């Protein structure tokens, strides 16, 4: 049975590339979509499982009380600021390894990973020390109040010991995803998160003879999961048939050309990450100052938002890998095609998720709290979220496509404008100046996501990203 013409016109690979762009054989629609889905689905499963485990964390912590949910939420953005450098390095590792994978240059791809491991080790140790010694002032600056400061400080300080492991496992998994080995990173993160949930079960409320550590138990569990993820990720590098096989006999001396390439892409990614984290931090501060109850409602809403984000992130990982690999093969036409395929998959999935959000909006908040006022507020946030999802998922995949080409500077500029400037400014105006409170803060998310989609969409359509040198 043949699909209607308008469906074929939207989804068929025959129509995704302009005739003048075609540089060789074009895969069939079935093959192209299967190639994307085969890379995307393990990444989606990985990301969704991580989000579900994080959600379960919040449910477990929520049993202690709203102040505990708010305290853990306060830690999120300062931690992400610490991780900005590592995320930027991972972006460059993904772009470079994907490009060298496409060019079948295994030796250089392995060098990229070795240099990324060096960077992760040095800065991971430094940031661990900063997190441990400056936990309390950072939490006060993040907006912790009298009923959350103790829990937030304890969580941030303890979880700081896992930063170096996050840096190293992140670099390894970024390289493996770029090489198309998303099933491995899926297994690594699922196992690590299962360990975290089991440890949470034992330590938060003190079961089977383990001490009751409450929020501190969640932090210990997080560090344990970070260590497990690193061990499993590192073990994957010692398989001799792996594209990214590493031996202790390899040269670990600084490789200037490779470090220069890493630095070039990382600089754009770092600017992006700093802009993102500062913007999100300021936005979280705006919401935190509404009070513990509103911030707890916000955190419950963000749990479902983060879960939805993971679907887009998984598709974006596939787009990043396929775009980079085809640029390495000197097939920019296929890079355009896979970018568009990722967009179409994201829109289809987002429509389905929006429907689910509307259907579960009255029940989802009850997983986290029994406070009726928090449940009512969170339920209203779900409707706004349903409107956000298609916009959010489309821009995430567009950003992943551009990163796959190494065009991180434009993505960085987009994030600085939308997240670093627009989100906190509009958030403050709508939340406080116009008196819309938490609803104003969430309307701001629509404005932010829409601005990103427009800017990234224009960049993609103009095609300049296809000529990025790395």
Image (cartoon, rainbow, N blue to C red):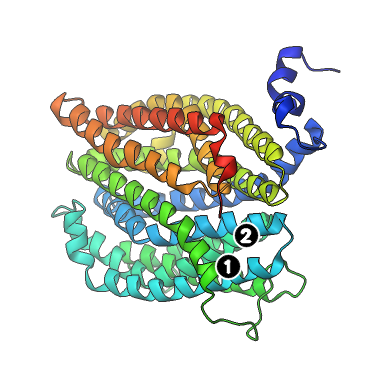
Determine the residue positioned at 64% across, 74% down.
Answer: 235
In primary-sequence order, the first of circles 1 and 2 is 2
**Circle 2 residues within 10 Å: few <14, some 14–19, many ≥20:** many
Determine the residue positioned at 18% across, 41% down.
Answer: 291
Numbered disc total: 2
Mark identifier at residue 417: none
Residues under numbered marks 1 and 2 in contact, where contact means CB atoms less than 8 Å apart: yes
Picture layout, residue 381 above or below residue 256: above
Foreground residue among 213 and 377? 377
Q: Residue furthest top?
A: 5
Q: Quadrant of residue 455?
A: top left
Determine the residue positioned at 51% across, 34% down.
Answer: 393
Residue 287 percent coordinates (x, y): 23, 40
Q: Which residue is mark 1?
A: 112
Q: Secondary structure at mark 1?
A: helix
Picture layout, residue 423 above or below residue 137: above
Q: Quadrant of residue 204?
A: bottom left
Q: Secondary structure at mark 2?
A: helix
Q: Which residue is mark 2?
A: 97
Foreground residue among 302 and 361? 302
């Amino acid at each position: 049975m043949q699909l209607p013409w308008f469906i074929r016109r939207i989804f068929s690979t025959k129509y995704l590339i302009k005739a003048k762009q075609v540089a060789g054989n074009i895969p069939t629609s079935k093959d192209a979509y299967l190639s994307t889905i085969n890379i995307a689905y393990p990444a989606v499963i990985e990301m969704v499982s991580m989000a579900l485990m994080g959600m379960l964390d919040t449910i477990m912590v929520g049993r202690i009380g709203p102040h505990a949910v708010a305290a853990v939420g306060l830690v999120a953005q300062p931690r992400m600021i610490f991780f900005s450098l590592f995320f930027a390095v991972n972006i460059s590792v993904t772009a470079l390894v994907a490009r060298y994978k496409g060019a079948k240059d295994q030796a250089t791809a392995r060098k990229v990973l070795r240099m990324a491991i060096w960077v992760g080790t040095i800065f991971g140790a430094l940031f661990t020390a900063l997190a441990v010694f400056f936990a309390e002032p950072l939490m006060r600056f993040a907006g912790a109040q009298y009923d959350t400061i103790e829990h937030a400080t304890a969580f941030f300080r303890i979880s700081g010991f896992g930063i170096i492991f996050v840096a190293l496992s992140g670099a390894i998994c970024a390289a493996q995803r770029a090489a198309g080995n998303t099933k491995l990173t899926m297994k690594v993160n699922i196992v690590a998160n299962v360990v975290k949930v089991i440890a949470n079960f034992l330590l938060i409320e003190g079961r089977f003879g383990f001490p009751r550590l409450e929020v501190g138990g969640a932090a210990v569990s997080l560090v344990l999961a970070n260590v497990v993820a690193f061990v499993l990720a590192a073990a994957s590098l010692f398989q001799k048939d792996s594209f990214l096989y590493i031996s202790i006999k390899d040269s670990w001396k600084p490789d200037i050309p490779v470090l220069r390439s890493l630095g070039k892409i990382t600089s754009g990614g770092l600017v992006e990450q700093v802009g993102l984290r500062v913007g999100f931090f300021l936005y979280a501060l705006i919401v935190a100052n509404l009070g513990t109850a509103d911030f707890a409602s916000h955190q419950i809403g963000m749990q479902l938002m983060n879960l939805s984000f993971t679907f887009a992130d998984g598709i974006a990982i596939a787009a990043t890998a396929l775009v980079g690999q085809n640029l390495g093969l000197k097939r920019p036409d296929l890079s355009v095609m896979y970018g568009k395929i990722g967009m179409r998959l994201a829109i289809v999935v987002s429509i389905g998720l929006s429907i689910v959000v509307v259907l579960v909006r009255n029940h989802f908040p009850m997983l986290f709290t029994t406070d009726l006022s928090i449940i009512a507020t969170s339920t209203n946030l779900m409707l706004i979220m349903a409107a956000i999802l298609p916009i959010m998922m489309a821009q995430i995949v567009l950003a992943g496509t551009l990163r796959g080409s190494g065009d991180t500077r434009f993505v960085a500029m987009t994030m600085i404008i939308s997240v670093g400037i627009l989100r906190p400014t509009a958030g403050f105006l709508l939340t406080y100046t116009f008196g819309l409170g938490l609803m104003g803060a969430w309307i701001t998310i629509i404005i932010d996501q829409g601005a990103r989609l427009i800017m990234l969409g224009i960049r993609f359509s103009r095609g300049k990203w296809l000529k990025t040198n790395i």
